[in-house]
Amino acid sequence: MTTSMNVLVVDDQPGVRFLLDIIIKESGHRVLIAENGLEALEIVRSTKPDLVFMDVRMPLMGGVEALGKIKMISPDTEVVLMTAYVSDETVEMAMRKGAMCCIAKPFDVDEIKTFLYDFYWRFCNKSDYYCSGNTG
């Protein structure tokens, strides 16, 4: 992989942040970390990440609320919501606000690796799509 993506991980659980940090770095991408939606908004304003993995339930600002704000700040940033409490209502609300998809926690490590690979090749390896890692 000659270029990499900027991937933001937003979760209030240190273990989840740590695991995703390892998976994403092993996949050849840069990782940004936030503990809640408010921190995520600051990072999105300054870096416009390519992809965000974000928990639904967090203190200060949850994932669904942050999702809407992220899409206003950086419409090209794709957001994947993660939740241990998957419901049709949550998924429907997330998709309405612009989420790419919702994944259930706990997630499978190999599924995340495959998702990153597919996302990179689908969105970031096309000449008509710009990913922030393509800076030289």
Image (cartoon, helix red, strand yellow):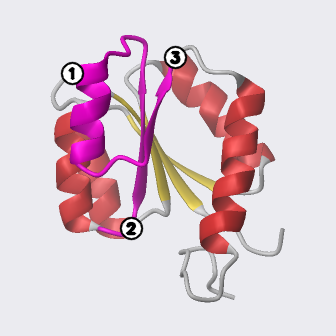
Is 113 rendered above or below residue 7? above
Quarter of image, res 77? bottom left
Provide the residue designation for mark 1.
59
Does 117 sit above or below residue 50? above
Percent position of residue 73, x then y? 22, 66
Q: For the residue labelled by badge 1, is the local secondary structure a helix, a strand or a loop?
A: loop
Q: Position of residue 47 (x, y in %)?
A: 40, 67
Q: CA distance from mark 2 to mark 3?
A: 25 Å
Residue 122: which quarter of the image? bottom right
Magenta residues, start to end = 75-104
Q: State the residue at coordinates (41%, 28%).
A: 11
**Left or right of 68 on screen, residue 26:** right
Residue type, numbered disc 2: Lys
First reached walking from the N terminus: tag 2 or tag 3: 2
Query: Rounded to the nearest whole Å, what is the CA distance between mark 1 and mark 2?
Result: 23 Å
Mark 3 crowd level (few <14, some 14–19, many ≥20, 10 Å Cα):
some
Residue 15 on image: x %, y %? 56, 17
Which SS class for mark 3?
A: loop
Q: Which mark is residue 48?
A: 2
Query: In what element is the residue under mark 2?
Result: loop
Q: What's the amino acid at mark 1?
A: Pro
